[in-house]
Image: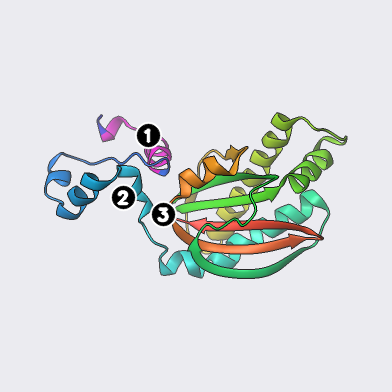
Amino acid sequence: MKFDKTPLAFKETMEDAGILFYEQMDDILQNRELLKELGASSASNVKNKRVLNKETVSELPKFIDATVVTLEMMTNAKAMKESASIHNLTIEDTNGKIASSIGYYGDMDGMVVLVFPEGIAKKACELLIGESTNDTELILDTLAELVNIVGGRIKTLLADESISVNITLPRTYQDIESLMEVVANRKGVQVDLSFNDDKFLFFLTR
């Protein structure tokens, strides 16, 4: 594959999925640490070992603000932050939870993961379409649109500080197990929030 004919958005999206690109074979063969990692694990795990940097953490309030404002708008509920910590994604009770994620890249890069009780996602969907529904696909589509709005807000807030990023297409997870496969071994900032009696989780990682 020639890089000069490869759209940057395609390359970044593939890297978010754990597929790494190198300019030439020597970049791999002469990288002892990489070869060691590849000998024991997949390229996806190498990508997942990237850690949060100071720039990402310093912009954390903007990411949370974009998320909270969007959710309050789409659920008519006030959000309360309960705790924040840095570790691998931890979900104590996965029952009745669905999730969505969106990646960003450019001057800085990473991924935002949102984990919802089905009740919050269903309420957001019903407010959006104006009627009650139990259609799982429709609820997941609404969840994708919600995280897409969050990504757009993040992009705008960062642009106000002359930080340019693009966002990937949103991805939804009907079961938490598939999400955990994507973020396995990735440390990030986890913020636990609540909307009335519903718990909601925000996770920022690279």
Give whichever of discs 3 and 2 has the lower sequence position.
2
| Residue that mark 2 sits on | 46
Specify the segment rendered in magenta: 3-15
Q: Secondary structure at mark 3?
A: loop
Q: Is residue 11 left or right of residue 158?
A: left
| Residue that mark 3 sits on | 185
Give the number of the mark in front: 3 or 2.
Answer: 3
Q: Secondary structure at mark 1?
A: loop
Q: Amino acid at mark 1?
A: Pro
Q: Secondary structure at mark 2?
A: helix
Q: Is residue 145 left or right of residue 103?
A: right
- Magenta span contains residue 13: yes
In the rendered view of the protein, which quadrant contains the C terminus?
A: bottom left
Classed neighbour count for the residue bearing mark 1: other residues with Cα under 10 Å, few (<14), some (14–19), many (≥20): few
| Residue that mark 1 sits on | 7
Q: Return the residue nearer the eye: 50 or 166.
A: 50
- Magenta span contains residue 191: no
Tell me the residue at 21%/45% (across/down).
Answer: 39
Q: CA distance from mark 3 to mark 2?
A: 10 Å
